[in-house]
Image (cartoon, rainbow, N blue to C red):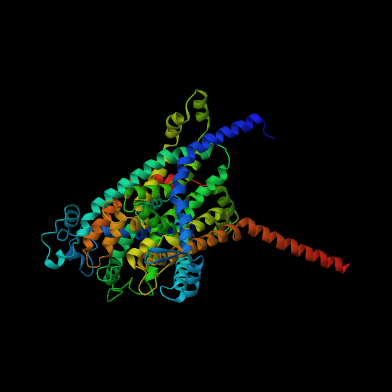
C-alpha cells in the first residue's frame, strides 16, 4: 500500500510530467489523430469531383471497393501487387541485411568501409534515390543497360521500367538499396550483444557455421528479428510510394499499381476522396494485420506454449494408454 | 588437399569475405558514383553508348550546376538540347532552401519538445505513462498516405495549403515520437546520480536539463536530431501533395516533378539530385559516429 504522502507525491509528479510532455502530445494529437478521425468520417461520405455532396453513405465506399474491386483501377489487382511486393521486399531486405551484418561482424578491414558506405543510402532521401535509379534504368541512356552492353551481354538497351514483367522487380531492387542499411545497423547491433563465449562453446563442439547460425545466432536474434520484420513490413507497404511515383507511375498497365498508389490515384487523379480515404483505412488495417501476425501469432512465447501444450497432450495420452494397459 | 591446412582454409575464407564485401560495396556505392559523375558530364556525352563510366577532360562540364543556380542555358548546346533545360530546373535551389528551412524548424521543435519529453518518459513514473508512451509509438505505424487525404482537405479549408507551417507541423508530429523513443532509451543508460545531485542543490528542472543532462547525453541528442532532420528533409508524400508553388515546395516535390519530364536534360536532373542529397549526406559523413551509435541503440518499449 502506498502512503498518502506517496500518493500525493505521485500526483504532483504526474501533473509536472504532463505539463512537460503536453506540447509534444498536442502536436501529435493535432497532426495525427484529428486527421485520422477525419479520414474515417471522409470514408463514410460521398464525394463527387472532390466536393462532398453532404450525404453520409456509411460503408458504401468500402462495399464499392470490395464489389467493384475488379473494375479499373482494380483494387484486387493492386492488393495482389502490394502483397507480392511486400513479401518479396521484407524477405530480401531481412536476408541481405542479416547477411551483411554477419559479414561485418568479424572485425576485418572491409567492415568499417561497408558500415560507412551503408550510411550513404540511408542518408539519401527516398525520392532522390528514386531519381538516381530512374537514371540508372533509363531506356535510352541507362547505365545498367550500358554496363551490360559493354560486357557484351545484351545487344539492345533494356526497357526496364516499361516492361510489365520486370518493372516491379526493378522497383524492389532500388527499394532494397535504400532500406537494407537501416536493418543492417539493427542486426549488427544485435549481433554484438551475443556473448562470444557462446560461439566459443559452439566451436568446441565442432559445430559448423551453418549449424551455428541456425542453432545459436538466429534463436538469440529472434526478438530483434521480430522487430525488424514489423518495421520492414510497415515500410514495404507504403514507403515504395516515392519509387513508384518517380519510376513507373503505377504502370506499365497496372503492374506496379500498389495500394498506396491506388489511394493516391483515387484521391487526387479521380478526386474520389471518400473512396480514397476508405482505401487508406483498408491499407492501415492490412498493416495492423501483419503486425498482429508477427507479434502475437509468431511470437516465441506463443510458439513455446504451443510446444509445451503439445508435449503435455502427448504425455497425457501416454499415461492414459498405460493406464488402460494396466 | 589444398584446403586441408588451417591456414589455407583461413585465407580462403579471407578471400571470400573480400569478394563478397567488394560486391556489397559496388552495389551500395555505384548508384551514387554514377549520379555524381553524370552531373559533371556534357549532355551529348551522356547519350553515348556505352556511357563513359570514367569521365575524361573532353566531356567534363559544370554547365548543369550553372544552369540550376542561374537559369542560363549552356551556350554550347544545340537548339534540340536547349529545349531539354526546363525552367523548373531553376526551382531546385530554392526548393532545397525550403527543405532546409522546414527541416531546421522541425529539428528545433524536436529539441525543445522532444528532449524534455524523452527525459520525462525515461525518469518519471506518472499516471498512464506506459499507455501514453505506447500511444505515441503507435502513431509511427500510421501510413502517411492514409492521413494525407484528410490533411489536404483540412488544410484547404483552413487556407494553410501550400505553406511551410503546415509541413513543419506535420513533420514535427511525425518525428517527435521517434525522437522521444530514442532519447528515452539513451537517458536510461546514463546514471541518474548527477541529476539527483543537481536537484539537491536546488537546480530547477530546465536548468538541470541544460547543465547536466545535455552534456552527458550529447551524442544521443545529436543522433536523434539528425534523424529528425533527415526524415523531414526527405519526406515526400506530404511534400508533394500539400504544396503547390515554390513558396513551400520542398526539394523532394520539385525533384520528383523534374524527373517526370522524359525529355528534360538528364545531366541537369543528375545535378539536381546531387545537390538534393548533399545536405543529409554531409550530415551523415560528419556525424557518422553519433548516427551509428544512435542507430544501434537498443530500443525497448
Q: Quadrant of residue B215?
A: top left
Q: Quadrant of residue B46?
A: bottom left
> Where residue A195 sits in the image (x, y, percent)?
55, 47
Residue at (82% x, 66% y) in the render: A320
> Where residue A190 sits in the image (x, y, percent)?
51, 50
Position of residue A32 in the picture relative to residue A308 (left or right):
left
Residue at (33% x, 47% y) in the render: B102
> Where residue A204 sits in the image (x, y, percent)?
59, 53
> Where residue B223 sits in the image (x, y, percent)?
41, 43
Position of residue A88 in the picture relative to residue A5 (left or right):
left
| Outermost residue toward the front in this view | A54
In this view, the residue in front, B9 or A299, is A299
Residue at (37% x, 55% y) in the render: B238
- Quarter of the picture holding the N terminus of chain A: top right
| Outermost residue toward the right in this view | A326
Position of residue A220 in the picture relative to residue A254 (left or right):
right
Amino acid at each position: 500500500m502506498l502512503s498518502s504522502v506517496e500518493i500525493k507525491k505521485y500526483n504532483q509528479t504526474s501533473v509536472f510530467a504532463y505539463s512537460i510532455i503536453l506540447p509534444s502530445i498536442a502536436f501529435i494529437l493535432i497532426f495525427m489523430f484529428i486527421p485520422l478521425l477525419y479520414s474515417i468520417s471522409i470514408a463514410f461520405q460521398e464525394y463527387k469531383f472532390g466536393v462532398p455532396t453532404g450525404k453520409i453513405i456509411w460503408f458504401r465506399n468500402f462495399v464499392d471497393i470490395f464489389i467493384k474491386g475488379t473494375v479499373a483501377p482494380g483494387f484486387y489487382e493492386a492488393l495482389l501487387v502490394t502483397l507480392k511486393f511486400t513479401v518479396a521486399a521484407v524477405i530480401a531486405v531481412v536476408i541481405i541485411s542479416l547477411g551483411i551484418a554477419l559479414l561485418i561482424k568479424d572485425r576485418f578491414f572491409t567492415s568499417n568501409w561497408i558500415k560507412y558506405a551503408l550510411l550513404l543510402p540511408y542518408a539519401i532521401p527516398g525520392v532522390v534515390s528514386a531519381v538516381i535509379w530512374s537514371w540508372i534504368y533509363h531506356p535510352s541512356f541507362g547505365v545498367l543497360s550500358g554496363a551490360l552492353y559493354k560486357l557484351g551481354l545484351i545487344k539492345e538497351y533494356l526497357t526496364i521500367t516499361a516492361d510489365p514483367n520486370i518493372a516491379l522487380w526493378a522497383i524492389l531492387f532500388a527499394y532494397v538499396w535504400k532500406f537494407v542499411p537501416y536493418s543492417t545497423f539493427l542486426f549488427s547491433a544485435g549481433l554484438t550483444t551475443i556473448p562470444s563465449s557462446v560461439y566459443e562453446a559452439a566451436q568446441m563442439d565442432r559445430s559448423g557455421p551453418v549449424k551455428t547460425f541456425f542453432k545459436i545466432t538466429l534463436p538469440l536474434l529472434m526478438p530483434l528479428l521480430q522487430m525488424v520484420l514489423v518495421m520492414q513490413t510497415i515500410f514495404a507497404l507504403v514507403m515504395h510510394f516515392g519509387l513508384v511515383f518517380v519510376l513507373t507511375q503505377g504502370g506499365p498497365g497496372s503492374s506496379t499499381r500498389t495500394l498506396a498508389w491506388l489511394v493516391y490515384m483515387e484521391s487526387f487523379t479521380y478526386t474520389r476522396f471518400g473512396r480514397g480515404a476508405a482505401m487508406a483505412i483498408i491499407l492501415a488495417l492490412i498493416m495492423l494485420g501483419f503486425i498482429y501476425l508477427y507479434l502475437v501469432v509468431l511470437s516465441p512465447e506463443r510458439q513455446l506454449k504451443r510446444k509445451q501444450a503439445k508435449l503435455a497432450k502427448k504425455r497425457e495420452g501416454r499415461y492414459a494408454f498405460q493406464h488402460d494397459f494396466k | 588437399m589444398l584446403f586441408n591446412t588451417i591456414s589455407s582454409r583461413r585465407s580462403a575464407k579471407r578471400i571470400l569475405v573480400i569478394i563478397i564485401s567488394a560486391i556489397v560495396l559496388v552495389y551500395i556505392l555505384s548508384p551514387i558514383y554514377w549520379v555524381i559523375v553524370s552531373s559533371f558530364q556534357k549532355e551529348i556525352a551522356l547519350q553515348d553508348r556505352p556511357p563513359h563510366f570514367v569521365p575524361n577532360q573532353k566531356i567534363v562540364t559544370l554547365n548543369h550546376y550553372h544552369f540550376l543556380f542561374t537559369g542560363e542555358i549552356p551556350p554550347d548546346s544545340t537548339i534540340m538540347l536547349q529545349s531539354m533545360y526546363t525552367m523548373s530546373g531553376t526551382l531546385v535551389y530554392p526548393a532545397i532552401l525550403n527543405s532546409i528551412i522546414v527541416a531546421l524548424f522541425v529539428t528545433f521543435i524536436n529539441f525543445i519538445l522532444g528532449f524534455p519529453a524523452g527525459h520525462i518518459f525515461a525518469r518519471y513514473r506518472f499516471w498512464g505513462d506506459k499507455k501514453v508512451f505506447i500511444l505515441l509509438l503507435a502513431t509511427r505505424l500510421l501510413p502517411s498516405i492514409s492521413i494525407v487525404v484528410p490533411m489536404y482537405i483540412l488544410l484547404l479549408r483552413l487556407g494553410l495549403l501550400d505553406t511551410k507551417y503546415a509541413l513543419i507541423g506535420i513533420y514535427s508530429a511525425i518525428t517527435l515520437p521517434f525522437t522521444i523513443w530514442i532519447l528515452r532509451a539513451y537517458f536510461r543508460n546514463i546514471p541518474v546520480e548527477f541529476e539527483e545531485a543537481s536537484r539537491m542543490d536546488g537546480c530547477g528542472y530546465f536548468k538541470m536539463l541544460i547543465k547536466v543532462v545535455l552534456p552527458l547525453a550529447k551524442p544521443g541528442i545529436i543522433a536523434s536530431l539528425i534523424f529528425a532532420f533527415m526524415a523531414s528533409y526527405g519526406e515526400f508524400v506530404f511534400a508533394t501533395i500539400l504544396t503547390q508553388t515554390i513558396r513551400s515546395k520542398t526539394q523532394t516535390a520539385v525533384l520528383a516533378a523534374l524527373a517526370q519530364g522524359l525529355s528534360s536534360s538528364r545531366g541537369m536532373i543528375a545535378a539536381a539530385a546531387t545537390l538534393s542529397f548533399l545536405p543529409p549526406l554531409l550530415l551523415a559523413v560528419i556525424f557518422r559516429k553519433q548516427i551509428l551509435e544512435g542507430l544501434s541503440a537498443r530500443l525497448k518499449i
